[in-house]
Image: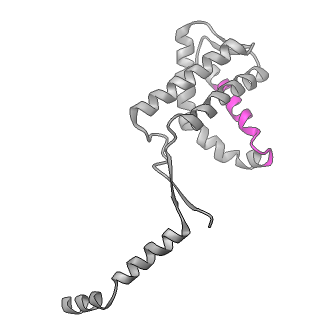
Amino acid sequence: MPTIRFARAVHESPFHGGIRQAFLRVFITGIAVFLAIAIVPGLEADSFGAGMAAVLVLTFLNLILRPILFLLTLPLIVFTLGLFLVVLNALLLELTAFFVKGFTVSGFWASVGGALVAASLLIFRRNHVGHPRSSIQIEPAQLLIRSTERLEGCGEQSFNQIGQLA
């Protein structure tokens, strides 16, 4: 028989996971930004401090602004089969460059390249580093046995006990 799979999201808040998950998110975003600066021509940071400021601002924008933009652009994301997410990430990278002095993005295609590099590492983080989802697998036969065991316990004794309470 096929296995029935019940998946439940445990606290899908972006703040779930505690301080360790928050530091891990900032660390992997930092690796993604510095790797994008090293690989993509057109992304530059004048100093290490400017790069770190870009990491913190981009993490903050991904945490606060990205879900709102995601909902607003959901029809485009569905229509392009998810490719618009790259454009959305590129726009957030451009916005980061607007807010952080010393971090420059020389054009839209440079921000798209940086978004692709960053997205590859962020996909790795989601898939391999402490994702807060859990699942329970139950065989249908076990589900049937458990439900009948509970029903067998609700016999005449239970009704007599209820009658005594009244």
Task: Name above or below for residue 69 compared with residue 158.
Answer: above
Give the residue displayed 62% in from the left and 67% down from the top: 1
Where residue 66 sits: x, y (%)? 61, 38
Quadrant in which the C terminus is drawn: bottom left
User: Looking at the rendering, which quadrant does residue 154 occupy?
Assistant: bottom left
- In the image, residue 85 above or below residue 112: below
* Coloring applied to the structure: one colour
Q: Position of residue 44 (x, y in %)?
A: 67, 11
Q: Residue sitting at 39 percent across and 32 percent down?
A: 19
Residue 122 included in the magenta stretch of the image: no
Q: Give the left or right position of residue 98, taking residue 147 as reference.
A: right
149 with respect to 124 (left or right): left
**Picture quadrant where residue 50 is located:** top right
Question: What residue is rendered at 65% in x and 26% in y?
Answer: 118
The image shows residue 121 at horizontal and vertical percentages of: 63, 27
Q: Is residue 103 left or right of residue 153?
A: right
> What is the span of residues highlighted in magenta in the rendered image?
79-95
Q: Is residue 66 above or below residue 141?
A: above
Percent of width and height locating residue 6: 54, 60
Residue at 53 percent of width and 17 percent of height: 53
Magenta stretch: helix, strand or loop mostly: helix
Look at the image and say whether residue 81 sits in the magenta stretch. Answer: yes
Q: Is residue 99 visible?
A: no
